[in-house]
Image (cartoon, rainbow, N blue to C red):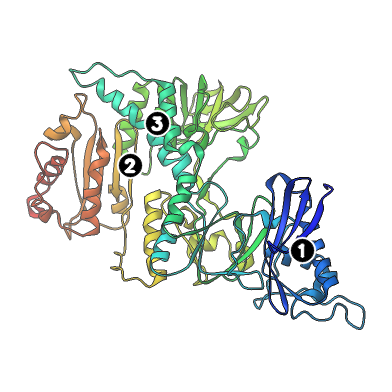
Amino acid sequence: MPDLTLTKNTDANRYEAWDGDTLAGFAEYQLTDQLIVFTHTEVDPSYEGKGVGSQVARFALDDVRADGTHDVLPLCPFIKGWIGRHREYVDLVHGAPETTAKDGRMPAEPKGPDGVPRVDSPDAATDPHRPSESDGPDGVRRVDVIVIGGGPTGENVAQYAHDGGLSVLLIEGELLGGECSYYACMPSKALLRPLDVRATSEHLPGLRPAELDVAALLARRDAWVSHYDDTSQLDWATGAGLDVMRGHARLIGEKTVSVSSDGGASTVVEADVALVLATGSVPVVPPMFADLHAWGSRDATGVVGVPDRLVIVGGGVVACEAATWMSALGSSVTMLVRGDALLTDQEPFAGAAVLDALRTAGVDVRLATRITDASRAGAADTGLGRVHGGPVTLTVERDESGSERIVADELLLATGRRPRLDDVGLDAVGVNADDVRAGRLPTWLHAIGDAGGGAPLTHMGKYEARVLGARLAGAHETPPPRDVPVPQVVFTDPQVAAVGSSEAQAREAGHDVVTVAVPFASAAGTALLRDDGVGSAKIVVDRATGCLLGATFVGHEAAELVHAATVAIVGQVPVGVLRHAVPSYPTSSELWLRLLEELPTNLR
């Protein structure tokens, strides 16, 4: 603890701690006839954790006791918390009981009217997101809506609730903007788009094939993730009128959370209207790989050191997209897929097209493969996107092929994600993760986006957030349809874009369906995109109503076709009416006409 000079600066209305010529910390106050009101405490960052705040508090309160003319009103959370831990000063607090009872015991710790005590660390005053001066004297902050999680889903529900007139506190423990902005959607597309342009240049006569500049590609990725700095995101949030608090939030009671900051301070916040869990999801790591420090999707999108040999475990969206860019960056990529196809949630022809393309690009895709053993020497967390130790050795088995050993420089696990609910304090309000997935929650508690167990897609989380935020604020909104279709794009080459039900899903749901499939290049607009036109398009139509149930497009730039299908499904537009939506010629949208013309005449 430094040897400080403690003074009372009556001109500035503060008690100060000086280390030579350096102001190490201070406590500000205001005087009334009967009260000394402590409003703010601050410690120089270079003195954090050295007990400066505690010295200032003790000096100030000793001075108040010696003066004997004022009671203390500790609006400043640090002073209030310090008094709570040093009970010999409780008698100074305005309205407090006598210091000791007749039996010699200290009086009970004062609490707010909600019964929640305030808990602070010695340096809580240095937390820039401590409760504002408008908080109640019990130290409990109160707002209309608390949103835990500052990703796109959390930001959207906060914005819509705020715009509807509610006070909102948005709490985030990592980067504001969430997984999508820094580790998923944005960096992956920043990596994939230049590769798509390069592939297009290789299949358009009249152009020289573009060359890949790996350093420039990674620099583009870094620019799109703002070099993992969320300053601009924070500027947007505050500009939109949102109140942001840094820290990890846990439920401690009905509509109430405790927020712990990196500095150790703990703030209690209570919501009057609702509490929203928008905490996202975390990767699923099978126990076999727990000690290997294998890459997750964050490492793949944040790649810094390109491994010579990369094994990817999984056959879903993350696995297929990561295989695309890691192969292009120079890795020798092997995909180990437990099932007998890729992208099994899509129409079978989609996974087949991506499988052919990956193999053509040199990716070794092994289907129906089971990993029986995994080991690694020198496994260590060396940083985001860097090789995490020595070589990885895997023992794999394939149907009737015996076992085989595979050695790689890095292992990427793309084995799924689960809602991040383990560390949010659900037990404090009598619910668990199963209750969240089943929607068995108190009326004031909401879980949306990945945390709610719905489609783990940013745009669906944002949609849920917009609907919920407006509803909490009582804003007028057209009621949503009973079933909102889920669109999704896989940014491989070729792209896969789908919405609604596949043929198998529609039949399983009991629909009598009519399906039509045509080559992706069967329209002039799609054929003109690249001379290696590959892929197909398919629609699934309800025979009874003539309405679209689902659509899948596999081909170059297929992503831009799927929204028309989404609109048709949401609007329940019969396919006979869709034929009168005339596509421009020659554009990719003309592919819709090819599909509709193949339907039975009674549906046209």
Give the residue at the far right of this rendering: 103
Q: Which residue is mark 2?
A: 489
Q: Is residue 132 above or below residue 506?
A: below
Instruction: Quadrant for residue 207, please give it.
Output: top left
Q: Calculate the distance from the C-alpha at mark 2 to the C-alpha at mark 1.
A: 54 Å
Q: Which residue is mark 1?
A: 82
Disc 2 residue type (three-letter): Val
Looking at the picture, tell me which residue is in the foreground, 401 or 119: 119
Query: Which residue lies at the image location 39% right of the left edge and 59% below the top edge?
Result: 464
Whether tag 2 and tag 1 are in contact, CB under 8 A, the answer is no
Instruction: Quadrant for residue 342, please give it.
Output: top left
Instruction: Quadrant for residue 61, please give it.
Output: bottom right
- Image x and y of residue 57, in percent: 78, 61
Nearer the observer: mark 2 or 1; the answer is: 1
Disc 1 residue type (three-letter): Trp
- Tell me if mark 1 has few (under 14), some (14-19) or many (20+) residues whose alpha carbon lies within 10 angstroms of its own: many
Q: Is residue 197 above or below residue 546?
A: above
Disc 3 residue type (three-letter): Leu
Whether tag 1 and tag 3 are in contact, CB under 8 A, the answer is no
Nearer the observer: mark 1 or 3; the answer is: 1
Label drawn at residue 191: 3
- Image x and y of residue 335, in percent: 46, 28
Precedes in sequence: disc 1 or disc 3: 1
